[in-house]
């Protein structure tokens, strides 16, 4: 599932990679993909793509086929108290083919499709990992230029659960649509490691907040 890397270089990490820039509903755009592909990647750099939905793997491979630095991990990122088990990952065929709102939280899917009930949703069991463990396993020895998070309803839970001590992260870009009144908590939490909100993040629709280390 996860590959351990120990190499100097720069890492670019996307949690919730979806289909990359292969989704026609997003006009074949993805902010993280555009951000990284504009850079000249070296042989020691890493592009870490985490996507729980196996139905998006082929599209991600196609998106990054010209970049040998890209590593796709088919798993989910969750808070630590949910690690150690395979969790149900919910989706609906109405969201096909790339399932932009699929989530470990069924209510997240139902908020986007209120005409459905829990019994209408498809689900599959997916391996999961917490964010800090993922970063240790995949980015050891590198500077993390950008950590992008779009975890469909779990963004706040994962950030507030994570101890960022020991990680050389320059920027965190997180989708703000589902943060609600927890945005202040996230700012205060990340502030412990010198991050402050500086404006819009890398999402091409303007849905992300960017936190940068001062």
Image (cartoon, rainbow, N blue to C red):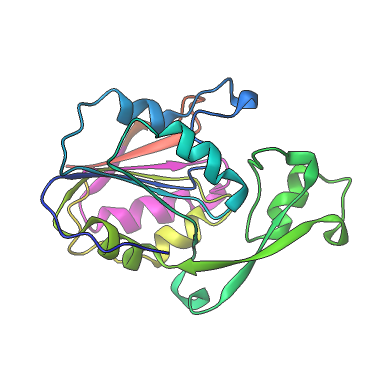
- The image shows residue 96 at horizontal and vertical percentages of 72, 39
Vertical order, 136 against 190 (above or below): below
Instruction: Report the residue that reaches farthest toward the top.
Output: 27
Left or right side of 137 for 7: left
- The image shows residue 42 at horizontal and vertical percentages of 16, 35
Instruction: Please tell me which residue is depicted at 54% across the width and 57% down the height of the picture.
Output: 154
Instruction: Please tell me which residue is depicted at 19% across the width and 42% down the height of the picture.
Output: 45
For residue 152, say whether it is visible.
yes
Quarter containing the C terminus? top left
For residue 201, say whether it is visible.
no
Q: Decide whether residue 151 is among the magenta residues.
A: no
Q: Decide whether residue 181 is among the magenta residues.
A: yes
In this view, the residue in front, 175 or 94, is 94
Instruction: State the extent of the magenta-drawn residues as a range.
Output: 170-197
- The image shows residue 62 at horizontal and vertical percentages of 48, 33
- The image shows residue 53 at horizontal and vertical percentages of 59, 52
Determine the image quadrant of residue 65: top left
Left or right side of 37 for 28: right
Left or right side of 117 for 60: left
Instruction: Report the residue that reaches farthest toward the left.
Output: 8
Count of labels in the image: 0
Quarter containing the N terminus? bottom left
Vertical order, 40 against 72 (above or below): above
In this view, the residue in front, 114 or 42, is 42
Instruction: Please tell me which residue is depicted at 66% across the width and 43% down the height of the picture.
Output: 99
Determine the image quadrant of residue 80: bottom left
Left or right side of 22 for 3: left
């Amino acid at each position: 599932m996860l590959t351990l890397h120990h190499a100097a270089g720069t890492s670019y990490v996307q949690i919730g990679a979806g289909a990359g820039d292969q989704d026609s509903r997003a006009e074949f755009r993805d902010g993280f993909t555009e951000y990284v592909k504009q850079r000249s990647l070296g042989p020691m750099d890493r592009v870490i793509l985490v996507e729980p939905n196996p139905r998006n793997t082929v599209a991600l491979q196609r998106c990054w086929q010209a970049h040998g630095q890209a590593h796709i991990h088919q798993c989910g990122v969750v808070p630590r108290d949910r690690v150690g088990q395979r969790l149900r990952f919910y989706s609906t065929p109405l969201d096909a083919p790339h399932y932009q709102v699929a989530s470990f939280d069924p209510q997240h899917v139902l908020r986007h499709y209120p005409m459905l009930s829990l019994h209408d949703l498809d689900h599959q069991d997916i391996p999961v990992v917490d964010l800090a463990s993922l970063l240790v396993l995949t980015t050891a020895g590198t500077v993390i230029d950008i950590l992008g998070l779009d975890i469909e309803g779990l963004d706040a839970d994962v950030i507030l659960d994570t101890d960022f001590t020991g990680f050389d992260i320059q920027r965190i870009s997180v989708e703000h649509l589902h943060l609600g009144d927890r945005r202040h908590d996230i700012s205060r939490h990340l502030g412990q490691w010198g991050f402050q909100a500086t404006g819009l993040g890398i999402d091409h629709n303007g849905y992300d907040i960017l936190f940068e280390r001062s």
